[in-house]
Image: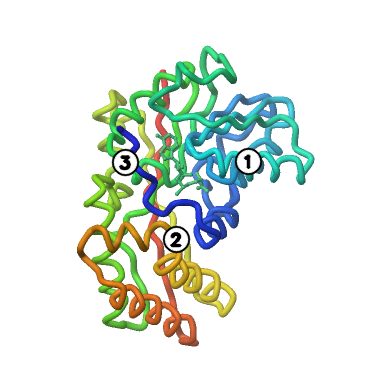
């Protein structure tokens, strides 16, 4: 299967980080393009839909369509939209590789096709990029953003943090995913047929340093490591034992307590113009 299993699964510790996401903190590259209230937007791999619903509030005369293969998160996304009273959004269980099987919106093309933190989890990010490109109408844009795990940074140094990062990258690569894709989204887009001159490539970081930010970031990784689907995938990979995972979770709890703690998550982001 081109998408493969979603590495993290949708445990509460995973959804907590996805549900924190907004247009402002997760797709600043898209802000200049949300300049028309009638836009039609597709959010691929929308997860629990907080970005999707935020996008919908910015295009009140348009609509946003969110798809995700997980029925569980699509239910959460629908609930979130209902709670916010947002009606110009539609969520459907679906896979970017099976677009023609979706019975939702039969659009000739979208003004914006958006995918946030999705390509890194796919076994065929190029195929997905080609498919997303096809769904953008002329004059529209494809917007993609993904982290580059190899560029993760933190302070102060802690040997356990290096262990965490090496393990994560090995587990993801073992699943044929691309944890470092954030640095070459533009290259994938070029392979998918975009001219380099039609791609704006930039970088935006998430910073977690205040006590509240450290609590959010460190606790979710401590919990993810020993409670989410990631735990089993790490064990199955053969790169970690239960004890290794307990130690990594303890590292995150220690990092949370460090008053001078600082974490930088580097995201590569691209806007590709469809002519
Ligand atoms: C890291 S989450 C990102 C969720 C959301 N975009 C966000 O930033 O909050 C990645 C999502 O991609 C979804 N996904 C995995 N394979 C997919 C595919 N082939 N087509 C569409 N979505 C996919 C997963 O189910 C998961 O919800």
Please indicate whether residue 118 sits to the left or right of residue 92 in the image: left
Quadrant in the picture for the C terminus = top left
Which residue in the protein does label 1 denote? 75
The colour scheme used to paint the residues is rainbow
Under tag 2, what secondary structure?
Answer: loop
Where does the image place residue 177, in percent across and percent down from the top left? Answer: 28, 46
Which residue in the protein does label 2 denote? 228
Q: Earlier in the sequence, mark 2 or mark 3?
A: 3
Q: CA distance from mark 2 to mark 3?
A: 27 Å
Disc 2, disc 1: CB below 8 Å? no
Under tag 3, what secondary structure?
Answer: helix
Which residue in the protein does label 3 denote? 185
- Binning the other alpha carbons within 10 Å of mark 2 as few (below 14), some (14 to 19) or many (20 upward) gives many
Q: CA distance from mark 1 to mark 3?
A: 30 Å
Disc 1, disc 3: CB below 8 Å? no
**Mark 2 C-beta to ligand 1 under 8 Å:** no
Residue 157: which numbered mark, if any? Answer: none
- Residue appearing at x 37%, y 59% in the figure: 230
- Residue appearing at x 31%, y 73% in the figure: 242
């Amino acid at each position: 299967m081109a998408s493969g299993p979603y590495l993290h699964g949708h445990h509460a510790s995973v959804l907590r980080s996805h549900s924190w996401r907004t247009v402002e903190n997760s797709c600043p590259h898209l802000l200049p393009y949300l300049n028309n209230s009638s836009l039609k937007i597709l959010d691929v791999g929308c997860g629990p839909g907080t970005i999707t619903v935020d996008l919908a509030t910015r295009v009140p005369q348009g609509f946003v369509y969110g798809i995700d293969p997980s029925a569980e998160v699509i239910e959460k996304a629908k609930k979130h939209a209902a709670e916010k009273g947002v009606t110009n959004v539609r969520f459907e269980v679906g896979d970017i590789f099976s677009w023609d099987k979706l019975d939702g919106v039969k659009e000739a093309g979208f003004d914006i096709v958006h995918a946030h933190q999705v390509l890194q989890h796919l076994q065929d990010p190029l195929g997905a990029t080609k498919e997303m490109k096809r769904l953008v109408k002329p004059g529209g844009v494809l917007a993609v953003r993904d982290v580059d795990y190899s560029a993760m940074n933190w302070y102060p140094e802690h040997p356990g943090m290096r262990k965490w990062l090496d393990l994560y990258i090995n587990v993801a690569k073992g699943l044929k995913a691309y944890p470092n894709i954030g640095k070459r989204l533009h290259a994938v887009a070029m392979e998918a047929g975009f001219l380099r001159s039609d791609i704006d490539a930039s970088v935006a970081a998430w910073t977690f340093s205040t006590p509240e930010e450290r609590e959010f970031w460190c606790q979710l990784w401590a919990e993810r490591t020993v409670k989410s689907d990631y735990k089993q995938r790490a064990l199955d990979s053969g790169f970690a034992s239960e004890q290794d995972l307990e130690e990594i979770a303890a590292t995150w709890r220690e990092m949370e307590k460090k008053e001078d703690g600082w974490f930088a998550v580097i995201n590569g982001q691209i806007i590709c113009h469809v002519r």
